[in-house]
Image (tube, helix red, strand yellow):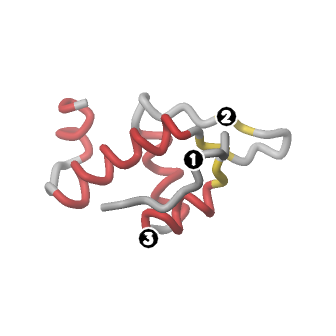
């Protein structure tokens, strides 16, 4: 899976991230709550802003859960 995100941006909105992964924003929010390796910043309104490092970690989570069929617990253990 290849994510098309600009390399010169520092932060990505949850909408951009969800669109890049072709999933609902609610899934990204859920994963953010479930996985400690995701640490998006929150702006004044409380919106999550993902860094390129967060995107890399999301790619790993996506790969384990969606492509390899890991359970959430299995993915957490693997990470």
Please state if 63 lies on the left or on the right of 38 as rendered: left
Query: At 53% from the left edge and 51% from the top edge, which residue is drawn?
Result: 29
Between disc 2 and disc 1, the foreground one is: 1
- Residue 41: mark: 2
Please state if 47 lies on the left or on the right of 18 as rendered: right
The tag earlier along the polypeptide, 2 or 3, is 3
- Residue 7: mark: 1
Q: Position of residue 71 (x, y in %)?
A: 19, 49
- Dot 2: what SS? strand
Q: Quadrant of residue 46?
A: top right
Please state if 1 lies on the left or on the right of 42 as rendered: left
Q: Are marks 2 and 3 in contact (CB under 8 Å)?
A: no
Q: Quadrant of residue 51?
A: top right
Query: How far apart are the alpha carbons under marks 2 and 1?
Result: 18 Å
The tag earlier along the polypeptide, 1 or 3, is 1
- Dot 1: what SS? loop
């Amino acid at each position: 899976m290849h994510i098309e995100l600009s390399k010169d941006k520092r932060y990505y909105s949850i909408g951009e991230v969800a669109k890049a992964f072709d999933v609902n924003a609610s899934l990204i929010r859920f994963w953010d709550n479930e996985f400690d390796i995701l640490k998006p910043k929150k702006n004044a309104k409380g919106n999550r802003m993902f860094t390129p490092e967060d995107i890399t970690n999301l790619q790993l989570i996506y790969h384990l859960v969606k492509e390899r069929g890991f359970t959430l617990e299995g993915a957490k253990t693997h990470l």
